[in-house]
Amino acid sequence: MRPASRAPHVHKFGGASLADAAAIGHATGVVLGHRPEPTVVVVSAIAGATDALLAIASHAERGERDVAGRLLRSLRARYLRAARAVGPRGAAGRGLLASVSAELDELAELAAGLRLLRDLTPRTSDFVVARGERLSARIVAAALEVVGVRARYVDATAVIRTDDHFGHASPDYARTD
């Protein structure tokens, strides 16, 4: 007789729960304290990041390079500060910082493209905004490893499929299954 399979224990943390390093530390403590394996942790962008990402895209589309650049530098500082504070030390920490920086470098390239094209489509807006969750997920996965929880970053786009209604997409359950 096979043992009954356990459904994953799911934790969802919104932006306020990930506002800074202390909040991320609290979130990892919650996961650590409720640790039936397997566990799935779903995270939002850090507090205020989604609005900042939308503002970066909007200012870039209007050709406002300085404003978009200032917002991007501020967002970069917040994510890197959190990654440094809760992430691992040594090579793993440097790897985390490199991946966070690469995501933000790509955002800067997107902003430059928007500035040139002056066209922010719903699809591009979704692509820009999703970066906040992806960055948070990388940092939280690393923070969980630091406290002894076996964790792996998974990009939601690798496991969840949606329809093509950009800006208001709905899950495509058949393709996701």
Image (cartoon, rainbow, N blue to C red):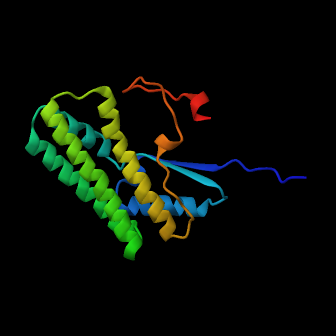
Left or right of 54? Residue 25 is: right
- On the image, which quarter does residue 148 sit in? bottom right
Left or right of 172? Residue 166 is: left
Residue 74 picture location, percent across and down = 20, 53
Query: Looking at the image, which residue sits at the far top?
Result: 165
Residue 131 picture location, percent across and down = 34, 45
Image quarter of the C terminus: top right
Residue located at (30% from left, 39% from top): 128
The answer to whether 48 is drawn above or below residue 30 in the figure is above
Taking depth in this image into account, of 58 and 107 the one nearest to the observer is 107
Taking depth in this image into account, of 146 and 160 the one nearest to the observer is 160
The answer to whether 169 is drawn above or below residue 70 in the figure is above
Query: Looking at the image, which residue sits at the far right?
Result: 1
Residue 121 picture location, percent across and down = 27, 27
Is residue 164 among what the camera can see?
Answer: yes
Query: Looking at the image, which residue sits at the far bottom?
Result: 90
